[in-house]
Image (cartoon, helix red, strand yellow):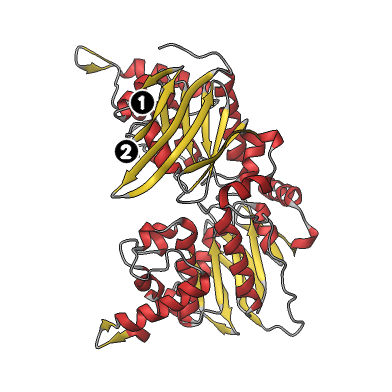
Amino acid sequence: MIKGDHGSALLTAEGLTKSFAGVRALRGVDLEILAGEVHCVLGQNGAGKSTLIKTLAGVHRPDEGAIFWLGERIDIPNPEAAIEIGIATMYQELDVVDGLTIAENIFLGHEIARGGFTKRSEAAKQTRELLRRLGHSNLSPNTEVGTLSAANKQIVSMARALSHDIKLIIMDEPSAVLDSEEVKNLFHVVHELTSEGIAVVYITHRLEEIRQIGDRITVLKDGRTTATGLPVAETTTSDLIKLMTGRDVENVFPPAAPIADDAAVVLEVEDLALAGVFADVSFSVRAGEVVGLAGLVGSGRSEILETIYGARRSTAGAVRIGGKTLRRGSVVAAVREGIGLSPEERKSQGLVLDEPIFVNVTLSSMSRFARAGFLNDRAARATAREQIQALELRPADPDRPAGTLSGGNQQKILLARWLVHGTRVLLLDEPTRGVDVGARAEIYALIRALAAAGNALVVVSSEIEEVLGLADNVLVVADGRVVETLPASQIDEHGVLDLVMKGTAA
């Protein structure tokens, strides 16, 4: 394969269009990728990013437009052709096989064989070299992938790409499930790849990452390119938001309403523990207050929320709502007393994706909408329409399957569900994961509005900036213990990380 010089045009797309069942997903996308650069592609959910990725990866073929590789027009009829050309794609949902070893995953589909027999020793040797190249020589080729962390699974996916003669790697939301240290390592690996002349297309919703990793930016909106080749150093965040949304959206958090001096304590958590996961967790949340849990992935943040909700049975301590102690390990008791959870994995744990919006919105309040054991669809739809209007959920169709909505609108469905139920305490685990910048601003405003209405909220987020921006008070969690509790106004991101590191080392 012909190799491009560092900084020369590697891939160029001109006027790409693509339609599905009469709906135009791409309406004229232009893109130029240079050898050795990190090119960030931004856009709200539905902007066309996924379709563009799959078009470059050979999953879809464009209806119109052209793709050029090193100046020559090419056709990419299938993913195998993309790999042969030199294009590999790492999707957000990694395509590793948990039951196979690292070496088996890396050479899956292009096994090293002779005489019809796989050469395991040669595969292991080449795997070790690929892992060393990616700075992970500590991993064994014979380790089963199912035992690896999300970060290490990404390394396996990258190694698989590099087992081919790859010059362009497309990464779709690679940092979505990583903590801050893992993100730093990811960035180091990306820089190593680009130093070799490999180009990286980096897709993310996190604008702060672009400053750390990106060279140039392309922005999509409604299937069109609104800007391409923007130098990161010369482009402001407000400019990017306007290009993505078509309007000025301040990437800041709404101001918090003051909490009344006599605000009642709604949620009390006292010496809560889950053996082997966390211990001695105590805090309270007043009406109108947002409490944030900050810490690294694996610190126990999500498990604390799940235990409060009753999805896990605590081994010690108590949870009280309005002074009433809840039965341990009972979701039914928690929901009855007014606790609602929006889980980290909303698609698999929170929503019934094949069911319409109105079913998902009324799921926790079925007794109110049932007659003789059957759902009163008319009443459920009417209630769902009220929430759709109040939360500006799009599209405004109660019969639309939840799985067809963007991440931001799926999050709104979960908020609507608990509003319909009359919930007093909302536990929000990663409320903006996979949500674009425009929808984030809406969700932040909703969280603030819910607090102002007298609800008590607990927020967990991997983004420390988000915790500090939303919370009135912050609990810093490390290795399953609360190492500090203080007002959000009295600490910054560096202070949180310092406490986390000290707590982890203790």
Residue 412 against residue 347 in the figure, above or below: below
Q: Which mark is residue 82?
A: 1
Q: Earlier in the sequence, mark 2 or mark 1?
A: 1
Q: Residue at 57% across / 56% down in the picture?
A: 438
Q: Residue furthest left?
A: 116
Q: Residue at 41% across / 28% down in the picture?
A: 88
Horizontal side of 156 relative to 192 (left or right) equals left
Residue 408 point in image, percent of width and height:
50, 59
Residue 113 point in image, percent of width and height:
26, 16
Question: In which quadrant will I find the N terminus?
Answer: top left
The secondary element bearing badge 1 is classed as: helix
Q: Amino acid at mark 2?
A: Gly
Q: Residue at 42% across / 32% down in the picture?
A: 89
Residue 428 point in image, percent of width and height:
55, 65
**Corner quadrant of residue 426:** bottom right
**Corner quadrant of residue 378:** bottom left
- Whole-angstrom CA distance, mark 2 to mark 1, is 26 Å
Residue 331 against residue 434 in the figure, above or below: below
Mark 1 surroundings within 10 Å by alpha-carbon count, few (fewer than 14), some (14 through 19), many (20 or more)? many
Q: Is residue 109 visible?
A: yes
Q: How many marks?
A: 2
Q: Nearer the viewer, mark 2 or mark 1?
A: 1
User: Residues at badges 2 and 1 in contact (C-beta under 8 Å)?
Assistant: no
Would you name the residue on which mark 2 appears? 99
Q: Amino acid at mark 1?
A: Ala
Horizontal side of 439 relative to 22 (left or right) equals right
Q: Residue furthest bottom?
A: 372
Q: Residue at 62% across / 50% down in the picture?
A: 242
Q: Is residue 92 visible?
A: no
Residue 125 point in image, percent of width and height:
41, 16
Mark 2 surroundings within 10 Å by alpha-carbon count, few (fewer than 14), some (14 through 19), many (20 or more)? few
